[in-house]
Image (cartoon, rainbow, N blue to C red):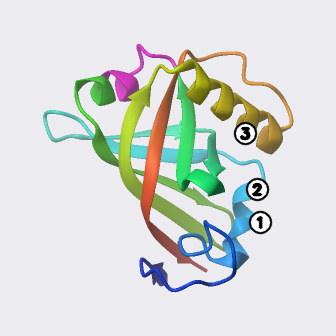
Amino acid sequence: MLLRTDTSPVRSGPFATLIPVEYQAFLALPRIASLGLQLADGRQHLTPVKATYDEGRRAAYVIVDRQSVKARRLTVEPSRVAIGEHDQSQWITLEGRARLSLEPETLDRARTLYRRRFDRPSRWGDAVVALDIDRVLTGR
């Protein structure tokens, strides 16, 4: 397992210190991810999602319905979350503090990134889980 949390660059560019080069293409391919967060009563909540990544902002986005469990939890207070993706031979987990955004600009940005990654528009959801990535774990 490779755990990368330092700030030494792996290549040029603003996102290079967080996502190793070999995983940047991995995160561009369409696949289902898992979003995990802790509920107010301490239970873990894990749900399948389609996540997108904004390299320039060091952020990940998940378009959600504002009435979903994850949205309601993040409405109460921002929380640490994890988004994980894997295939048969590698995996990546992005961790950080997340908040629920109802801002039209954030929703537009998330929809643009979704269309780019999944090659179709996201027609549902009225809010965005916005994750500020501060830790990346990877493995093969």
- Residue 102 is situated, as x and y percent measured from the top left of the image, at 47, 19
Q: Which residue is under mark 3?
A: 113
Instruction: List the single residue furthest toward the left.
Output: 41
Q: Which residue is under mark 2?
A: 28
- Label 1 element class: loop
Horizontal side of residue 70 vs 128, given as left or right: left
1 and 2 marks in contact (CB < 8 Å):
yes
Q: Quadrant of residue 43?
A: top left
* Residue type, label 1: Ala
Residue beneath the point at 75% across and 33% down: 112
Horizontal side of residue 47 vs 96, given as left or right: right
- Label 3 element class: helix
Residue beneath the point at 78% across and 44% down: 117
3 and 2 marks in contact (CB < 8 Å):
no
**Numbered label tally:** 3
- Residue 111 is situated, as x and y percent measured from the top left of the image, at 70, 29
| Magenta residues (range) | 65-72
1 and 3 marks in contact (CB < 8 Å):
no
Measured in 3D between alpha carbons, the distance from the residue under mark 1 to the one under mark 2, in whole angstroms, is: 5 Å
Give the mark toward the camera: 1 or 3. Answer: 3
Look at the picture and state if 127 lies above or below 10: above
Give the mark toward the camera: 3 or 2. Answer: 3
Q: Which residue is under mark 1?
A: 25
Measured in 3D between alpha carbons, the distance from the residue under mark 1 to the one under mark 3, in whole angstroms, is: 14 Å
Badge 2 crowding class, 10 Å Cα cut-off, few under 14, some 14 to 19, many 20 or more, is some
* Residue type, label 3: Leu
Residue 19 lies in the magenta-colored region: no
